[in-house]
Image: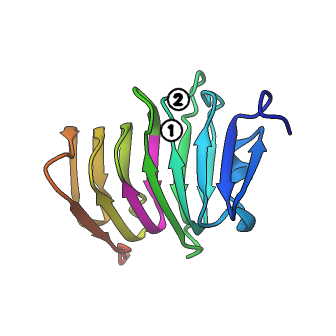
Amino acid sequence: MTEEDAIVKVEADGQTRYYKAIDDAFTDENQDGTVTLMKDVTNGHTIYVTGGPYILDLNGCDMSSVSEESVTVTVGKADGDKGNLTVKDSGTDGRLEKLVVESGSLTVGNGSFGFVGDNASSCIGSINFKGGHADEFKINSRGYWTDDVGNFVDGLRTFVLWRRFVRG
């Protein structure tokens, strides 16, 4: 894959790799690496991040859909397959439409987000904020949500997530 054709660049283990699909960047060989967007991602779908740790650098690019289905980055999976992701924006005006935790650890370094939260039916892990902006923030597993959250700039905030069990 050439740099000109790539959507993302990954720097891991002293090597640089290029990928046409962001989904392909979150692999075992790229753990402890930085996944840097080189172009906007506009095809709506869910990108599962398991394993890690990984750093996702928006690099001033947008991850937002032109269709009805949103671009969602989901940390971990409901089956307990954990992920570890830090998201940041080394550029300006990068934006991620939807960022969700199902199982694992998410750290938001900075950036702009349409939605940040958890999946109430299956989440376990944590969300750590060091900065950034979220239009909507919901911690369903804790019964906490708010619209128009604003900026997370006044120090670290950590939310511990757990599964919610409903008896029927």
SS at mark 1? loop
Residues 40 and 165: in front is: 40
Q: Quadrant of the C terminus?
A: bottom left
Which residue occupies 55% across, 65% down? 76
Residue 104: image location, x then y, percent: 47, 70
Does 105 appear in magenta?
yes
Q: Which mark is residue 61?
A: 2
Left-right relation of 103 to 149: right
The quarter of the picture where the N terminus appears is: top right
Q: Which residues are magenta?
A: 98-108
Which one is nearer the viewer's eye here, 115 or 113?
113
Residue 121 higher or lower than 59, as above or below: below
Which quadrant of the figure has residue 118? bottom left
Q: Is residue 108 left or right of residue 81?
A: left
Which residue is at the far right? 1
Q: Position of residue 75 (x, y in %)?
A: 51, 60
3D distance between C-alphas at marks 2 and 1: 5 Å
Residue 19 lies in the magenta-colored region: no
Q: Which residue is situated farthest in the left direction here?
A: 154
- What amino acid is found at the position of numbered circle 1 in the picture? Leu
Write down the residue under mark 1: 58
Q: Main secondary structure of the magenta part?
A: strand
Callout 2–callout 1 Cβ contact below 8 Å: yes
Picture coordinates of residue 70 (x, y %)? 54, 35
Tag count: 2
* Residue type highlighted by circle 2: Cys
- Mark 2 lies on a secondary structure that is loop
